Amino acid sequence: MIAPPAIGRKSKTPSKFKQDTRSLKRKRNADDLESLEKSVQDLGLKVEIKDFKDLPLSQPTASGLEASHFKTLTDIQSKAVPLALKGRDILGAAKTGSGKTLAFLVPVLENLYRKKWTEFDGLGALIISPTRELAIQIFEVLRKIGRHHTFSAGLIIGGRSLQEEQERLGRMNILVCTPGRMLQHMDQTAAFEVDNVQMLVMDEADRIMDMGFQTAVDAIVEHLPKKRQTMLFSATQTKRVSDLARLSLRDPEYVSVHEASTSATPSTLQQFYIITPLADKLDTLFGFIRANVKSKIIVFLSSGKQVRFVYESFRHLQPGIPLMHLHGRQKQTARLDITSKFSSSKNSCIFATDVVARGLDFPAVDWVIQIDCPEDADTYIHRVGRTARYERAGKAVLFLDPSEEEGMLKRLEHKKVPIQKTKAREKKQQSIKAQLQNMCFQDPELKYLGQKAFVSYTRSVFVQKDKDIYNINNYDLEGYASSMGLPGAPKIKFRKGEDAKKAKNVPRGMISSDDESDGGEAKTKKQEVRTKYDRMFERRNQDVLSGHYSKLIANDDAGETNDPHGDADEDNDFLTVKRVVPMDETDSESDEAESGPAGKLIEGVGRDPIVIDSKRKEKMLKSKKQLLKLKENGTKLVFDDEGVPHQMYELEDEEVFNRRGPAEKQRARFVEDATDKVREADVDDKELAKAKKRERREKRKAREAAEQAGVDDEEVPDLVEDDDHQDPMDLLASLPLDDEEEARPPKRAKKWFEDDSDDERKAANKKKSRVIETVDEPETLEDLEALAAGLLK
Ligand SMILES: Nc1ncnc2c1ncn2[C@@H]1O[C@H](COP(=O)(O)OP(=O)(O)OP(=O)(O)O)[C@@H](O)[C@H]1O
């Protein structure tokens, strides 16, 4: 300790005093750090620590926790935090909603703090999350409990320009990121150094280690220093997480707090399943939502298209509760907006894909409904984990097709998931089939969406690995299509050997679509007799669907391929029907629709047949003018006196040609003759120009003389040249130059965003204008990052 200044001594100057105070503070901090480090070393691992105040934590973390109202530790926290503070590698597994986020964030802040990490030390901790939403959530918790620290923290999840992110990266001490984006930066951002990273954390590690993310994670880990602390957390510990050699964990501590527990899910969670044939599940779901309008509900579906169809159709049916939808193909801004709206809502129902299944912490969710069976028991556990979080109560219902019951129950039992059978109340059941049919008839876009949803659902079932649960032949697909309001089930051919998990993570565009098999053709019941109504229905929708029609309707002649990316909204390559049509088949769409868009090869004269493999070509064929471009150019012929046609330029007989001398001489003579002709013509032109000039001068003189003499215009012979005789050169000279085109309205620069002034213009051009999609930067993300700067004092 430094002794206080003795009384009576000569008082110090203010600057000297300031210096002393600073060094005093520094010394005290060093002492504090030393004693903190000692406390951490002495921390016994046998005693269970209940309160955060009993942990050897720095003042900034302690006050951050207190300000966020975290007092007592959860089970996973009390086991994992002391170990992690001591620098041990951790493999943590604990039930959903049990507080894993703090279990790694507290050690991240503390360990960097004790290492006296500053902005000059660069990146100290990297936290990887499988989804953007989860990354944002982790970042928010970090911001809350780290508010009194001086570290800088960043969120690297895409959604803004790479360059913008690059500028920030160099300054970050703690990064929360998604694997793909992180890897992109490691490869492309020169100033981004990861050599100093002390801690690597993976939240929802099993998902990150899933197929698809594996390569990205491997590459990231390769960039990181070998000597570091690694922590993996998940709600379900799978074999893959235990396969740790590739992550170079050093003698990791397995912290699995609920291993001995009789259930893998929180005890406050009530779980039910209901047997509902595929063809009835929309009815059952609607009945359920109608009966629970005063609740907060999450409904899980298998694909983005399923989500969109159910959302759009239920919205029209107005069940009496606010509806939302969330899937991976929405823009980042929309996703953030919806997530926060659902978080703050009291009663609402959100339709979602597994993008929200992991880690997301929505407060006070009453029900989790899984209308499409999850791909495995782990996914089931993560989905139901969105309710009954941190000691709250919650309920979950799983819809099972009769064919899925046995297999799924076996899997759940194996994973220690207690679930009871229940039944929907007959009274509450309500069929919405007729309404959906009517809606699809009225709204072709909805019908199209339904077709896509049907296809993506069928595909999702087909690609499932667990054939004990999923067998495409067991489902009543025709009945399902009809329950969606569709006039029939689109026929689909599938590809063999697809992996559902892999397909989920692989980026679009990486899939080849041509190795198809007849494998499991969608089971369609006996061909129903098509009524007049059916035909009318199909015809009515052709205008809107024509572009999509060929992709969705079965075609036995032209091959169809199945893209495993049902989620891809614009997956035009999903069912691509390559048609070969004659060039003049422009009006044949309706006929074709009646008979099915069968592929025909019509050979155009002297030209290859046109293959319609893009929207652009299809559009082109509709316009005669455009079509002309595709046609062969005509040949101009000259007829002689006998009426015999000749080409415009016919080659002279070689002998006649040779008789006139060698080719080189003939060429020289031709050039000479041509030069003479041009010269003569030039002389004539000059003569003519001179004469005209003279004439104009004379006319001008005569006009001036007449004006001086005071003669009326009428009396003067017509001296003004009429337009017909105007000199073409003068006329040319009078035309505006390119850059003088003031009269012409300037072309509007292309805009990729809209501003306020656009509103007025749009209102004026309402009918004509095309909607320009806004490509806004995600506001909430910016806000978040601005807030993160709060960490950087
Ligand atoms: N010590 C604590 N005291 C009070 N509340 C806590 C504590 N730790 C976590 N919570 C709260 O519990 C909820 C769940 O925490 P968290 O999201 O970390 O769970 P999780 O285990 O990561 O869940 P999942 O496996 O679903 O990702 C959060 O709302 C969080 O604020």
Image: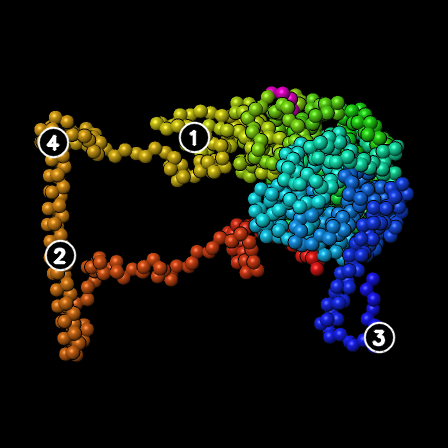
Judged by its main secondary structure, the magenta piece is loop
Type of amino acid at the residue the image marks with label 1 = Ile
Residue at which label 3 appears: 7
Residue assigned mark 1: 610
Q: Position of residue 128 (x, y in %)?
A: 69, 42
Which callout, 2 or 1, points at the residue further toward the start of the chain? 1
Q: Is residue 503 magenta?
A: no
Rendered position, 197 above or below 68: above
Residue 474: percent from left, percent from top: 72, 23
| For residue 684, above or below residue 278 | below
Q: Residues within 10 Å of mark 3 (few under 14, many from 20)?
A: few
The first of marks 1 and 3 along the sequence is 3
Residue 662 marker: 4
Q: Nearer the viewer, mark 4 or mark 1?
A: 4
For this rendering, which residue is in front, 543 or 476? 476
Is 721 situated left or right of 9 in this image?
Answer: left
Type of the residue with mark 4: Pro
Is residue 214 something one can see in this rendering? yes
**Mark 4 element type:** loop
Check disc 2 and give the amino acid type: Lys
Question: Residue flagged by tag 3: what amino acid is it?
Answer: Ile
Display colour scheme: rainbow
Q: Identify residue for label 2.
A: 686
